[in-house]
Image: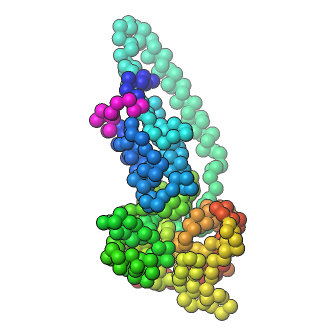
Amino acid sequence: MLTPFVARGNASPQPHKYEDYLRQVAESDTFRTAPVMRALLVYLWKNQGQPISEYAIATEALGRPAAFDPKSDSTVRVQVARLRAKLKEFYEVAGESFPLLLSVPLGGHELQWTYRTPEKSFVSKFNGVPRSYLWAAGITGLALVVLCIGLMVDVHILTASLPAARAPLPRFWQSFLLAGKPAEIVVPNPVYFSWPSHQVDVRDLKISDFTQWPSSPLLKETAAKWGPPELAQQYIDGMEMRAGLELLQFLEGEGQQVRLTESQRFGAESFAAQNTIFLGMPGAAVYLNQMLEKTNYYIADVDPVIVRSRDPRAGEPAEYRETSYSADRRTALAIIILLPTRPEHTRTLLLLGRRLTTLSSMLVTHEGLKLIDEQWVKAGSPDAWEMVVQADINRDTILNFHALACKPISASFWK
């Protein structure tokens, strides 16, 4: 049991020793795979006792642009709710023995803390008790331990005789997750064009390669006034992060060793170390563009998304286009690319598109995986392949999936 310390909430600046406990929380396994949650936690800790607006949290902690509007965008409230869930998850593991209790009360976004001083040790409570009593208690306790061990052995034998509860991984994930290798999900940092001296960052959805900025009328016009832009990739798009988290939770639930990282922290040489899932659009990383030059399907435009085939087969469309039926109803196109096994015995999965939650939802549901498997079999079940998929969407609700076309990828891809 722990008893609360006098210091509580934000009544006074926290002593330095509490910073060490905060660091332990931020660097725990719970927060290590959640960089956005870790950044938000540290930001709220550093700004205790100060009036913090949703706008400040969004732009200073979550990397949202200066045009962020908290009235129309619920990003802050969603992320704060996730932080509450992460803190609950941490304390379920750490238990009551952890002295610093952190919480974010419902209805607000202010971080509150309580420091709890541990009570005296268990042994010290028996000072002054006659040794004869302690010996008798010890013998009785030993007998109970022996009895418990016997019961545990019986339970273990019974448990071992039961069938395994977890079903085998679907064929798609079995082919990607090579045995003994961890998985890393890479969430891209979108390309922004920055004029730091004017404190302006601009994102043109049609331009995903920084070197192509002169082809954008808006960027070209702005550059004529303020000079050429600088590359800024310190943000993470909320939809891409949501897709990454959905895949992370699914794979962890399947007992896989997996973590989440940003493309800024992930180099081309990292593909050799583990199985890698890369989410995003071409242009997010130079090494990604180099890979996509060898594939058949590619994203030719982003508004609307147009997917083209470099070598269409007889009867196969040379182009696939997104369709907008109304302000709410539309289709969403994406590409799944399962590359051949690398020389280091790791695999790479590329998930490309603007609305990545359609891809993540497709890859974690029985319905979506079944459609992928059917198109895969139709293509001859190659070891490595690329596939064009589509989802029908009503606002943010996915109505159904479609697997449109699949082509094999040569085993000599990495040569």
Give left or right: position of 142 versus 161: left
Which residue reaches farthest left?
Answer: 16
Q: Position of residue 4 (x, y in %)?
A: 42, 24
179, 259: nearer the viewer: 259
Which residue reaches farthest front?
Answer: 225
Tell me which segment is drawn in magenta.
9-20
Magenta span includes 97: no
Q: Position of residue 323 (x, y in %)?
A: 66, 77
43, 118: nearer the viewer: 43
| Residue at horizontal 50 percent and vertical 67 percent from the top | 279
| Residue at horizontal 60 percent and vertical 44 percent from the top | 160
Instruction: Name the quarter where the N terminus is drawn.
Output: top left
User: 9 above or below 227?
Assistant: above
411, 158: nearer the viewer: 411
Instruction: Name the quarter where the C terminus is drawn.
Output: bottom left
Magenta span includes 16: yes
Q: Quadrant of residue 363?
A: bottom right
Q: Position of residue 36 (x, y in %)?
A: 44, 53
Number of labels in the image equals 0
Residue 180 in view of the camera: no
Q: Position of residue 17 (x, y in %)?
A: 30, 34
Residue 217 in view of the camera: yes
Give left or right: position of 381 versus 36: right
